[in-house]
Amino acid sequence: SAQPEVHEFQAETRQLLDLMVHSIYSNKDSFLRELISNASDALDKLRLESLLDKDLDVDTSDLHITLVPDAEKRTLVVADNGIGMTRDEVVGLIGTLARSGTAELRRSLAEAREKGVSDAAAEELIGQFGIGFYSTFMVAEKVTLVTRKAGETTGTRWESTGDGTYTIDDVPDAPQGTSVTLALKPADTEDHLYDYADKSKLRQLVKRYSDFIAWPIRMDVEKTVPVEKPESESESAEDDKAPETKTVIEAETINSMKALWAKSRSEVSEEEYHEFYRHVSHAWDAPLETITLQAEGTFEYQALLFIPTQPPFDLFMRDSKVGIHLYVKRVFIMDDCAELMPEYLRFVKGVVDAADLSLNVSREILQQDRQIRAIRRRLTKKVISTVTEMRDSRPDDYRTFWDGFGRVFKEGLVNDPDNRDALLKASSFASTHSEEELTTLADYIARMKSGQDTIYYMTGESRQQIVNSPHMEAFRAKGIEVLVLSDPVDEMWVSAGAEFDGKSFQSIAKGAVDLDADDEDSDDTSKDEREKAYADLLSWLTTTLSDDVSETRLSSRLTESPACLVGDTFSMSPQLEKLYRASGQ
Ligand code: ADP
Ligand code: MG
């Protein structure tokens, strides 16, 4: 087409771009990491595609990433010869920020602004969501992307200055792959930090952020080399003059390309792990925990896993993704490999590299594969034990973990009975023992009254609601600790028959909790007498309220309120009833 098509950004995208253009995010360097990360993904995809589709007509003999800075024109090109994008993909992926979190991010930012929070807090928000390709607008006045999909003949140009619109155009002679050209903002002379057309700056950034990328990242560098002369001449000239030199331009690979998961822990720095985490998880925070595992024997594999610090916005969304990438002998096979991690550990990010899988393994095969199942079992146990260790050695980090992921983690108490004990051991709970601190079950048991043989709990919508419940009165009066369970998932696992250390869980809102049995001063005759005295009242109440209650009885559990409603031992709690109703059952 002769005229480029002009498209408008979606409102949400426009707002995000606006944010980038006025870059409140101070770590502008990150744009390079994002572009290299995208290029690396594109190369992974092309290699896999060419292995699976023998008819795909592409040259994969020299897959690489190139950086071309031009200090005079103040441009920087980041190019790859990877999978490329079709015109529709460009519009879908680049034109409309396909990420479902954009609206969420915008809302959070608007809220934050209203509260007048600092730029640092806004940055943190952006870091939490990640912004990928759009981060280029922090450093560029204009961004031009030219791409041609592997196997297609025509390419596409996308261009924008980050205001309301972008243009789309056909490019008949585009090389296969993708190149992104940034027209850099004027250099900030005060601060050379922002000079992204400077080769030494770029080299430094690649080393810092992208060293582990598995594909060569090349940049032309000027080198001084001796001028080669015929043997006889150079020998005679040896002692009187310095050897003649000339300047040549040579492409140099500036990253070391080491696969971090294949290295032992002592060979890799924390910073390198962190950058790798950001690469695989597309996140901007730092991992709370790094887990390495190298298995030998029947099934040989290596795993490098991370527990994030911040929960992603989509943790509870239906299409939330599992963050494990599967490699087979260093060849990328797929991301979001759900077969490698149970759903309740979906927040774990990282890489598994298995030695004995076929490269064209499909999701269906994965589900059946013995090796995959063995790996998943082992990784699951490893993550759980890591969480337990974290709780014992780094309580503050554990608290961060628990506040962010505890609700997801506890889904395992319902869905993974095999690991329930280990999961209970790694879990913490709010209780009436302390308003702020959480308790482990072991600590709860250590504080149990003599004669108490069950773990008391109450579920509800909030701590407030639970502790103010009349059911709590007798327990408070007698100083018996009660677990305060206010996450929706709690109702599910306590009703799934969990036990800990031989103790069952008992709801204080269900059945006849007989506190007097533990009470040595209690006097059975007086109880009988009281029952006689109130018999008429009780039977009148039962008849009058027969539509709503099945029985009315005297209770020793109330000390302040005159009466309360109690569920049958085997009835649904109000929370479970609500859950079922909400799911239409
Ligand atoms: P993310 O990488 O987290 O998906 P980005 O904003 O960085 O988000 O990129 C959006 C999408 O655009 C990518 O998922 C990918 O499909 C596509 N894309 C970006 N850069 C490239 C590239 N160099 N080659 C092929 N596809 C790309
Ligand atoms: Mg990206």
Image: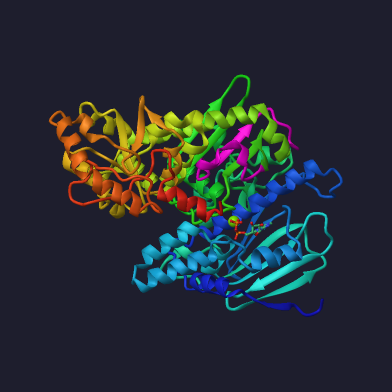
Q: Position of residue 228 (x, y in %)?
A: 70, 44
Q: Position of residue 457 (x, y in %)?
A: 32, 40
- Residue 408 pos. (x, y %): 46, 45
Residue 572 sits in which quadrant? Answer: top left
Q: Residue at x 54, y 49 (%)?
A: 281
- Side of 560 where 130 appears, left or right: right
Give 200 or 544, whichever is nearer the viewer.
544
Split into quadrants, the picture shows ligand 2 in the one at bottom right
Above-or-below relation of 395 to 56: above
Q: Is residue 546 above or below residue 14?
A: above
Between residues 224 and 144, which one lies in front from this camera angle?
Answer: 144
136 horizontally vs 436: left or right? right
Give the quarter of the figure containing the N terminus.
bottom right
71 sits left or right of 455 in the view: right
State which quadrant residue 498 falls in.
top left
User: Between 370 and 566, which is closer to the camera in this rendering?
Assistant: 566
- 8 in relation to 35, above or below: below
Residue 349 showing in the rendered view? no
User: In this view, which residue lies farthest toward the top?
Assistant: 297
- Give the magenta part as a residue range: 334-361
- Rendering quarter of residue 199: bottom right
Name the foreground residue: 353 vs 547. Answer: 547
* Residue at the (30%, 54%) spot, across then down: 465
Residue 341 highlighted magenta (yes or no): yes
* Residue at the farthest right position: 55
Would you say residue 575 sits in the magenta stretch? no
**What is the x, y in percent for residue 452?**
25, 29
Residue 7 visible in the picture: yes
